[in-house]
Image (cartoon, rainbow, N blue to C red):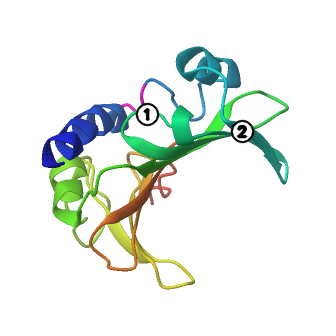
Amino acid sequence: MRRLALIFFCVLSSAAWARAWKGIDPGTSTRADVIEKFGPPSRTVKSGDKEILAYLGKQAIKGTTQTQFKVDPKTGVVERIDVFPGPKIDKAAIENSYGKACPPGPLPDSPCYLKKVTDDFRVYFHYPRLGLAIFFNPDGVTVNSFIFQPPRLPAKK
């Protein structure tokens, strides 16, 4: 199981530096790119003004239990990728793969996270330079999901 988690992280880590996941880059890649790479989705769902391509069950992408690609139907561009990992991944593995907490003050050039809490008190790490948010399970230690989006950096003053 640890070996599977390590393999999963190697794939995720290299992709995150490029703001992509398994070759799909939010903000650039298209719906057609997703289908070409992973085949037809298990489900396609409309959610508000977005289309969600979901890969789950027997069609789950290797290393995941589910992956959702949120697409703008007008442009066909992937805006966000939600990844639910199969193996258990802990906080230490996240910090070793993506970077430690950001120091006080302006963001450094290297990736680091800002620890945040959702309205329902779920802890997550936001890596602004990577366009990555990592949500933890209620135990606060193991990962529930990864969200890949184009980076949104705060404006420099």
**Left or right of 63: which side holds 70?**
right
Stretch of the chain drawn in magenta = 18-22
The tag earlier along the polypeptide, 1 or 2, is 1
Quarter that holds the C terminus: bottom left
* Disc 1 to disc 2: CB gap under 8 Å: no
Task: Determine the image quadrant of residue 70.
Answer: top right
Mark 1 → mark 2, Cα distance in angstroms: 20 Å
**Secondary structure found at label 1:** loop
Task: Determine the image quadrant of residue 133.
Answer: bottom left
Q: Is residue 148 visible?
A: no
Callout 2 environment at 10 Å: few (<14), some (14 to 19), or many (20+)? few
Residue 51 x, y percent position in the rendering: 77, 41
- Say which residue label 1 marks: 21
**Left or right of 18: which side holds 47?**
right
**Secondary structure found at label 2:** strand
Look at the picture and state if 152 lies above or below 55: below
Amino acid carrying mark 1 in the image: Trp
Amino acid carrying mark 2 in the image: Arg
> Which residue shows up at 52% across the image and 78% down it?
118
> Which residue shows up at 68% across the image and 18% down it?
32
**Could you say which is closer to the camera, residue 98 or residue 43?**
43
Residue 111 x, y percent position in the rendering: 27, 49
Residue 39 x, y percent position in the rendering: 60, 20
- Say which residue label 2 marks: 43
Q: Is residue 123 visible?
A: yes
Secondary structure mostly seen in magenta is loop
**Could you say which is closer to the camera, residue 49 or residue 105?**
49
The image shows a total of numbered marks equal to: 2
